[in-house]
Image (cartoon, coloured by chain):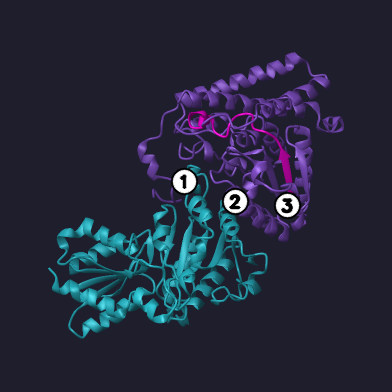
Amino acid sequence: MARMRMTQAINQALHEEMARDERVILFGEDVRISIFADTRGLAEEFGSDRVLDTPLSEALLAGMTVGAAATGLRPIFHLMFGNFFYTAWDAIANQAAKFRYMTGGQVTMPLVFMAVFGGGRSQGAQHSDTMHSMLVNLGGLKVVTPATPADAKGLMKAAIRDDNPVVFLQSAGRGGDLGEVPDGDWIVPLGQADVKRQGEDVTVIAIGAMVRLAMRAADVLAKDGVGVEVIDPRTLRPLDTDTILRSVRKTGRVVVVDEGRLSCGMASEIAAIVAEHEFESLKAPVRRVAAADVPIPFSPPLEREVLPSEDRVVSAIRSTLTKR
Amino acid sequence: MSLNTTSAVGTETLIDWYRRMQLIRHVEDRLGAASKTGELPGPVHLSIGQEAIAVAVGACMRPGDWATSTHRGHGHYLGLGGDPNLLVAEIYGRATGACGGKGGSMHVADISRGILGANGIVGAGIGLATGAALTAKQRKAGNIAIAFFGDGGANEGIFFEAMNLSALWSLPLIFVCENNGWSEFVSTASITVGSIAERSAAFGIPHSEVDGNDVLAAHDAVSSAAARARAGNGPTLLEMMTYRTRGHVESEQTFLPGPYRPPEELAMWQKRDPIDRLHAVLRENGVEESALNAIVEEVITVTNAAFQFAIDSPLPEPEAALRDVFAGERN
């Protein structure tokens, strides 16, 4: 166990998996210099044949990821910012998400697309999106969103070892978060949610950077004697509905916090699953706290207005306690 | 036709190519007819008139090589050695098809033969082939990847991205552009400036414009490009000049306002039919007409058997729709 930042945990996972399996290769813009430091040092250790700086050609590189995976490598394409998925969208949506299925299962597709996502740092509308619901909606991708350094390491290792296309999304601005990370072969299986905090009164399901907001909100409500259970799904597909629904049966009150936009977002999906399966258990309407249905603005007061905040999570939780 | 090359290739090989080209022609003719009678669940894009290119490329491929195809991909599938039964069954949407009925005409694939799949997105196969070329380069076994695309695909940005990166990394890749003169219902000349082949000059990639209806010329060009790629000298761009003598899609007469291609253009290309031309070469090389007729009879038998196999095959169980999304799971 060692205390490290989330980007260091990802870096450790990449080091370990590249050492373990020579079919694992990594490419993308600036992977050698690595602006987030998550891929730094890999080129020095594994050589420029396996760690490749690329031109800005996302459409091609995403297609190459599919082609390389289908022919026996285990490629990782670092897209840097999640918004750049849109530039690579054909290869992600039409190729990666469908290729195995269209061939009737003739190929395995062991690939990872990695990027940071989300707002909060005045990166402007084209570097701040949360696109995980769109990726889940494609039907052929696994999507992971770690919220702690330990989960980041364990999920990255699981993503690399998975024989399917996995999108690894790290919350922007949370790369510096510190946490204890197990040494060596620490794997977090895809499809297992984590109860980050136990509570009896309200279930808060929070994704990525929103887990921290939810934990702070839980602290606030604890002072009022309200027990908040915080669930981090960790992977959005496969989604661990069992853990979510078990908590809902216990508390009967649900708030979903997501940095994606409200309409057709992951918060809506989870709210719908809860309503379909545990309507009888609910003591109050399910509440969603998500980004407003607008592009993410640049100026800090504007951006704060659009994104979920601790205050909004607190008031959403309180509203489930008063409404019946 | 270059007689020098003819002697280098050998008559037996030419006869094999003739058989393959006839197989593509006959299978696609039947598919066209089946499309018009409504037997096929979806659209088919035929490559009739373009058979020489698929067969020439197939003749240059070795085990471990990869090729990506296009929406007009039946010829590639058969030219690269794919099983006609599995092809036709797939296009009929049968459980026995190459992809169990999940792919259809635009997604026929046989990974075991290096056929990385037809692709419904114009230009997208270029990205997949470039990735396969990266695998081949990493493995250092002298394998190559081939990207089939059309004149339409040559106007997609991914083509330019792939030329840059494949040249930069010396990837063992061949760009095979089948320029059939038409992007759906618009003439390529009206939407494309300059020469497609010469676009590679800026990237330092060797190129040649090839008579794509001459299987020997096409084979020569692919063979040289393959040798170059296998030797680690990087990609080549081949612009194969050809023509589809059928429409963009077999059902087009049901929705188009009228003809869109000049009849004299079609007549001119029909005189340059790749199968007729290979037939003439074989006759010049002393192959008897009766021997060539026997090959056609044999191809007709194989074609009939493929269609019978498809028609006799069961449709997929509906539950199969939920399988094959992820490896190692039912979904």
Q: Mark 2 points at which residue?
A: B128
Q: Mark 1 lies on which chain?
A: A
Residue at disc 1, secondary structure = helix
Residue at x 39%, y 77% (from the top left corner): A303
Q: Is residue B243 magenta?
A: yes
Q: Chain A is drawn in which colour?
A: cyan
Local packing at callout 2 (Cα closer than 10 Å; few below 14, some 14-19, many 20+) is: many
Considering only vertical position in the picture, is B63 above or below A218?
above
Q: Residue furthest right?
A: B4
Considering only vertical position in the picture, is A105 above or below A113?
above
Indicate the amino acid at tag 2: Leu
Closer-to-camera residue (A186/A160): A160
Real-space Cα separation, disc 2 to disc 3, in angstroms: 21 Å
Residue at disc 2, secondary structure = helix
Q: Name the residue under label 1.
A: A101
Residue at x 47%, y 30% (from the top left corner): B92
Indicate the amino acid at tag 3: Arg
Marks 1, 2: nearer the viewer: 2
**Residue B272 appears left or right of A97:** right
Q: Mark 3 points at which residue?
A: B199
Disc ID at residue B322: none
Res. A198 in view: yes
Q: In which quarter of the image is the N terminus of chain B?
A: top right
Numbered range of the magenta stretch: B237-256
- Discs 3 and 1 share one subunit: no
Real-space Cα separation, disc 3 to disc 1, in angstroms: 35 Å
Real-space Cα separation, disc 1 to disc 2, in angstroms: 16 Å
Q: Chain B is drawn in which colour?
A: purple
Q: Position of residue A251 (x, y in %)?
A: 18, 69
**Residue B321 appears left or right of B135:** left
Considering only vertical position in the picture, is B28 above or below A280?
above
Closer-to-camera residue (B320/B220): B220
